[in-house]
Amino acid sequence: MHDFIHYYKSKGHVFGECMTSNNTNLMYVYIPKNASSWTKPNLKDLGWEFYNYHLDNLYHKHSVIVLRDPIDRWLSGIAEYFCLYNSDFDFTRSSQDFLNLIFDRVAFDDHTDKQILFLQNLNLDNATFFMCDNNYKHKFSKFLVSKGYQNNYFKYKNQYVTANDSKKNAIRNFFAEIVEQNLYYKNKLEEYFCEDYILINDSHLYE
């Protein structure tokens, strides 16, 4: 367990990271690239604090989880990865060998790995799932109001981290075009993220 949860610690994330407070049974388990940049400030305004459900033994709490289309998330994630760790890479000179390596490995950090890894040992029957899409902000706000939280959840604008950064957006578009045009590479992503697709299909999403 110890080695697993710290697998991406050097990249800035420890598996099990979440937000909650002592006076609620709810626990927001955040997954990088799944609207966490918008969600966390809202919960912080409510007095929620940062915990780790593995290290703090919070498995009993009701999990609030945001999922995202795996390929859409990976495209944003791989752009984040290159900007963080290989920002000077010249994509105009990328080779077939380079692309084969990328799509053979798929996961390079917490932004590009499987979403299911961030939910290990949780009782997913005791969870509320949202989809990271254009309706997420409204649905999440509606959910919190239904739980007795009265607040202005539209205080923060949507955080389109990749779209608002020209370099990240260019990298995302580079890989998006490749995935769209090359069925082999798309299949490699779908195979790697098959567990995430199953999770999304089996989850009852909040309406």
Image (tube, rainbow, N blue to C red):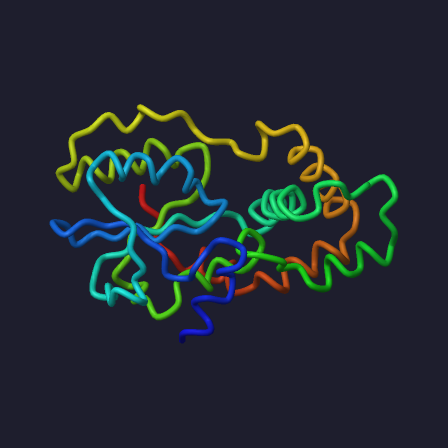
The residue positioned 43% from the left and 67% from the top of the image is 5
Q: Quadrant of residue 142?
A: top left
Give percent across and percent down for residue 132: 44, 42
Q: Is residue 52 above or below residue 36?
A: below
Q: Is residue 35 left or right of residue 64?
A: right
Pick the residue in front: 109 or 183: 109
Q: Is residue 64 above or below residue 92?
A: below
Q: Quadrant of residue 180?
A: top right
For the C terminus, the image quarter is top left
Give percent across and percent down for residue 127: 28, 57
Q: Is residue 38 above or below residue 178?
A: above
Q: Residue furthest front?
A: 10
Q: Is residue 49 left or right of residue 148?
A: right
Pick the residue in front: 144 or 47: 47
Q: Is residue 182 left or right of residue 5?
A: right
Pick the residue in front: 177 or 81: 81
Q: How many marks?
A: 0
For the N terminus, the image quarter is bottom left
The residue positioned 16% from the left and 31% from the top of the image is 150
Pick the residue in front: 198 or 7: 7
Q: Is residue 110 above or below residue 40?
A: below
Give percent across and percent down for residue 145: 19, 35
Q: Quadrant of residue 91?
A: top right
Q: Is residue 131 left or right of residue 180?
A: left
The residue positioned 14% from the left and 52% from the top of the image is 22
Give percent across and percent down for residue 43: 27, 39
